[in-house]
Image (cartoon, grey):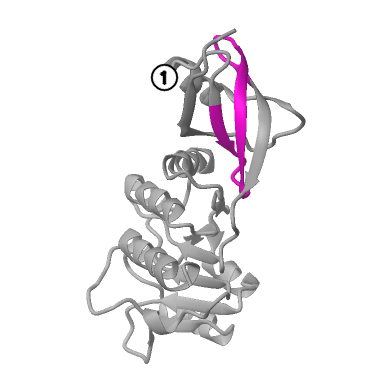
């Protein structure tokens, strides 16, 4: 009988658990076997990214696959409110990927890359970005994976928004509400953040016509990814933690 080894300080991703036995993806199997030197009999922790943690035991290892037995499940508490950030991807993709990682750590519920009139990037490799989200999920030991939507025209996002609180951040001179005054307890929120050249006045007017509140993020002019981080951090501090 193999000696008990706990590797529960590392989290693995299992998106669709079914039954008592589950086969990890090739990427997760490689991390378990080749990187962490996992063996049959080891105990590990997994998450489905939908709010559930699993305790499991490794029962089979091969060169590119690992099979685990699910022993118990634990549901994580749902967030008090959900934040949806619509944000224009930056020209330098590493800056956008950095934002995705931090948004995951801070518990953002959904992220929609925006296609705006002044967008600097008009194409994305969603599969690559999803891997960055999963890596951040595991690193931060969380059970909720943000939903990453396709690159979408900002007008479409504005018209489809269903959150009770809707806001658009921009640098115009018209009256704007401070970010700190936006939040409502236990209420879902969507905040739109534009490209480096900001939203156009037409885009802002459309948002206002659909019930979006123009907001400002302080006196400093922030980079797109910094603005996204500020919104995510403020939501976690003032709303998610009650």
Q: Position of residue 162 (x, y in %)?
A: 64, 73
Q: Main secondary structure of the magenta part?
A: strand
Q: In this view, does 119 lie above or below 132?
A: below
Please tell me which residue lies in front, 122 or 166.
166
Magenta-colored stretch includes residue 51: yes
Magenta-colored stretch includes residue 148: no
Please tell me which residue lies in front, 85 or 8.
8
> Which residue is located at x 52 percent, y 25 percent?
27
Please tell me which residue lies in front, 77 or 13.
77
Residue 152, image quadrant? bottom right
Q: Is residue 36 above or below residue 77?
A: above
Check the image and name the residue furthest to the bottom: 175
Q: Can residue 85 be seen in this view?
A: yes
> Which residue is located at x 49 percent, y 20 percent?
5
How many discs appear?
A: 1
> Which residue is located at x 24 percent, y 72 percent?
221
Q: Is residue 203 visible?
A: no
Q: Which residues fall within the magenta stretch? A: 44-67
> Which residue is located at x 38 percent, y 64 percent?
233
Q: Where is residue 180 in the image (x, y as percent from the top left)?
A: 38, 80
Residue position for label 1? 35
Q: Answer with left or right where residue 68 lies relative to residue 142.
A: right
For label 1, the crowd category at 10 Å Cα-Cα, with few meaning under 14, some 14 to 19 and many 20 or more, is: few
Q: Where is residue 59 in the image (x, y as percent from the top left)?
A: 64, 16
Quadrant including the N terminus? top right
Check the image and name the residue furthest to the left: 220
Q: Is residue 62 above or below residue 4?
A: above
Q: Where is residue 237 in the image (x, y as percent from the top left)?
A: 40, 68
């Amino acid at each position: 009988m193999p000696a008990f080894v706990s590797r529960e300080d590392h989290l693995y991703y299992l998106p669709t658990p079914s039954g008592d036995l589950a086969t990890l993806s090739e990427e997760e199997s490689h991390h378990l076997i080749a990187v962490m030197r996992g063996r049959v009999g080891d105990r590990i922790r997994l998450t489905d990214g939908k709010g559930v943690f699993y305790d499991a035991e490794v029962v089979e290892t091969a060169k590119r696959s690992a099979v685990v037995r699910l022993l118990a499940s634990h549901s994580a508490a749902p967030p008090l409110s959900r934040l949806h950030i619509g944000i224009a991807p930056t020209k330098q993709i590493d800056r956008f990927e950095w934002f995705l990682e931090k948004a995951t750590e801070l518990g953002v519920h959904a992220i929609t890359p925006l296609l705006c009139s002044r967008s600097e990037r008009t194409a994305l490799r969603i599969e690559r970005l999803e891997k960055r989200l999963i890596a951040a999920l595991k690193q931060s030991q969380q059970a909720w994976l943000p939903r990453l939507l396709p690159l979408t025209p900002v007008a479409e996002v504005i018209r489809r928004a269903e959150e009770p609180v809707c806001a658009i951040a921009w640098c115009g001179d018209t009256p704007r509400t401070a970010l700190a005054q936006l939040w409502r307890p236990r209420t879902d929120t969507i905040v739109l953040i534009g490209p480096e050249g900001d939203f156009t006045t037409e885009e802002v007017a459309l948002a206002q016509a659909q019930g979006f509140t123009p907001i400002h993020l302080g006196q400093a002019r922030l980079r797109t990814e910094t603005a996204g981080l500020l919104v995510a951090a403020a939501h976690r501090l003032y709303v998610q933690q009650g």
